[in-house]
Image (cartoon, rainbow, N blue to C red):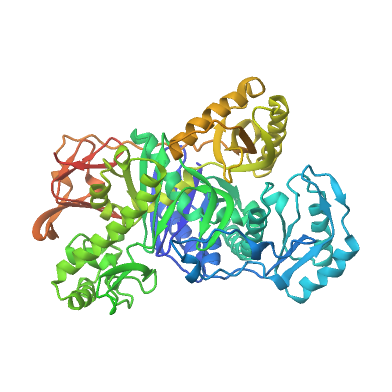
Amino acid sequence: MDYRLGVDVGGTFTDLLLIEDDTGRTYRSKVPSTPDDPSQAVLRGTKKICDMAGIAPSDLSLFMHGTTVATNAILEGKFARVGLIVTDGYRQILQVARSLVPGGLAAWIVWPKPEPLAPLESTIEVKERLDAQGNIVESLDEAGLREKIRVLKEENVEAVTVCLINSFANNIHEKRVEEIVKQEMPGIPVSISSDILPEKQEYERALTTVANSAVRPTVARYVQNLRKELRGQNMNGQINLLRSDGGLMSSEKAEELPVSLLMSGPAGGVAGAVWVAKHAGFENILTLDMGGTSTDVSLIENGVPRLTRDTVVGDLTVRTSSLDVKTVGAGGGSIAHVPELTQALRVGPESAGAVPGPACYGRGGDLPTVTDANVVLGYLPDTLLGGEMKLDVEASVKAVQKIADALGIGLREAAAGIIDIVNENMFGAIRLVSVQQGYDSRDFALMAFGGGGPLQANAIAKLAQSWPVIIPNAPGVLCAYGDATTRMRAETARSFSSRLDTAEGAELEENLNQMAAEVGAELAVQGVPRDEQEVQFEAGLRYQGQGFEVVLPFERQGFAERGLDLLAEAFHKEHEKLFTFRLDAPIELVNLRVTVLGRAANVKAGLIEIGDGNPEAAIVRTTRVWMDNEEKEAIIYDRGKLKAKDRIMGPAIITEMDSTTLVLSEHVADIDTYGNILINPAS
């Protein structure tokens, strides 16, 4: 029997989902995260869930893991000291950067410019030059390079980046520099830009490759340690990590290309949402993944999540594919406070995290959090994780009372205020991926998951007018579900500089075939046979003179005959959708991109027993909640006992092992054949 395990590390909990491939049977578990060493929670959780299923780690054929190790290294500034090798005359490429400054009017006055990941004193120049077509203008000065490498040795760099001008067109000099650095500095990892981002725009190429080097030692140590420990438990199956774009890569490849892991954590939830939406019959989805520290939102259109070419982590923006996920500092552990200066209630972005956590967790926390506010309002039962965690209600009351006293209002009014503010924060993030991208949130359903998402989703759907609210099975571990059900993925790109009306379709098709062969071979090395690979193609296009491009998918079949005309037509249409206008101007082809995917996971969606519409058998008890500025009676249901076609009228609370769903008054929750909860206005 084959088993696959999905593991997602969050700020508060590490989620695990074990799937039996043949039957689709699942086992789920959560263990507290261990921020100092995330692998400890992963290993502890793996042993725990294997014991639950009555199997040994050696029975696992696939281990899929979403990780925030690379992300945290950037956010916390715990990255390696990077040495940078550039073409003579380009030493200050990272310092010059781009002219764009984030923020509103006059932001440049107060914006603290972040320090480059590769400092100037660790940057050396080498004499060499290629032209834009890749022809050698000046040969590489190997003797001069060897002499200058001593500077990097004296700076004690832990990783080296090589980014030479026009290497996207010909990597012969970068490859030779890599060989020399490895000879002179054995044991130091080397990243070259023609491998990481073989595209035009030197600054973006340099920054992305430097970022790869900056997190490479940290990620390599984590991955190697995790692999060693898993092998020590006789887990001999394939170990894959989740990429930022929602695909998987082998753990060995992740050591070389960690910049592709910067959005690994949020990508798992989106991948899981796609899988659930497909079975539930919904194509247009807004996702709401609320954890203990932050909330991630994304948009899925026609069953496909939006991808972006830029990945943003803190002040760092790198050119690598990732799912278009927006993150706000609003989670169950977000701390509420009242600044003395404004005397106005604020929630987050500071979080109580996993340690000490919200006050109700009983781990020493005494600051009021979103979770504590939900406890005070009666929305959370007094136990979590299937009874494993007992909540300290009195501690929540004492914590939230601090806010009430500071504002001079009642306890439950203060708690309701905390919830209203955090909901508005999350609604603001939803607007970023919908309204500000040209989409109407009313045309999308809202799928909520994570430990806190189902608790807030009904209220957020009222703000966004996104119906129904979909609460999937095991919402607290859906990110792990995404890790376990997504596909292997690899990609490559090439830059071009050609107008569509003068380009040669046959020549471009030949390039596409060559790129597909290269990236297919790369995926084969990672364990995906050629006959199981699916190839996809994209082109970056822009009007002549524009400084940005629009990325469009296209078919390779028949490309030489009609592909360029179809691309032009699609570009005009997409540009008008995004920016409300089209131009009568030549179109430029900027780059081509080829993505190869592995076989989709054969994981079945389980059906649940059909009932008669009466959920009475699932009633646990009644409780009192504060809702609509008054105390009301609500019924608590056990989700595990609900059947398909059951209908629940709000106010109601639906509990399960890993999450709690709140149904507001004047709303109704229906259970579909897969066990999803669908919440709509009662009218």
Residue farthest to the right, as pictured? 143
Q: Position of residue 551 (x, y in %)?
A: 55, 39
Q: Nearer the viewer, residue 656 or 120?
A: 120
The relative height of residue 206 versus residue 321 in the rendered view (above or below) is below
Q: Quadrant of the C terminus?
A: top left
Q: Position of residue 680 (x, y in %)?
A: 21, 41
Q: Nearer the viewer, residue 33 or 490?
A: 490
The relative height of residue 394 versus residue 448 in the rendered view (above or below) is below
Q: Locate residue 501 relative to residue 359 in the image: left or right.
A: right
Q: Position of residue 351 (x, y in %)?
A: 37, 69
Q: Nearer the viewer, residue 93 or 72?
A: 93
Q: Position of residue 521 (x, y in %)?
A: 70, 39
The answer to whether any part of residue 502 appears in the image is: yes
User: Dividing the picture into quarters, in which one does residue 372 lie?
Assistant: bottom left
- Which residue occupies 30% across, 66% down? 389
- Which residue occupies 71% across, 26% down? 504
Q: Nearer the viewer, residue 430 or 565?
A: 565
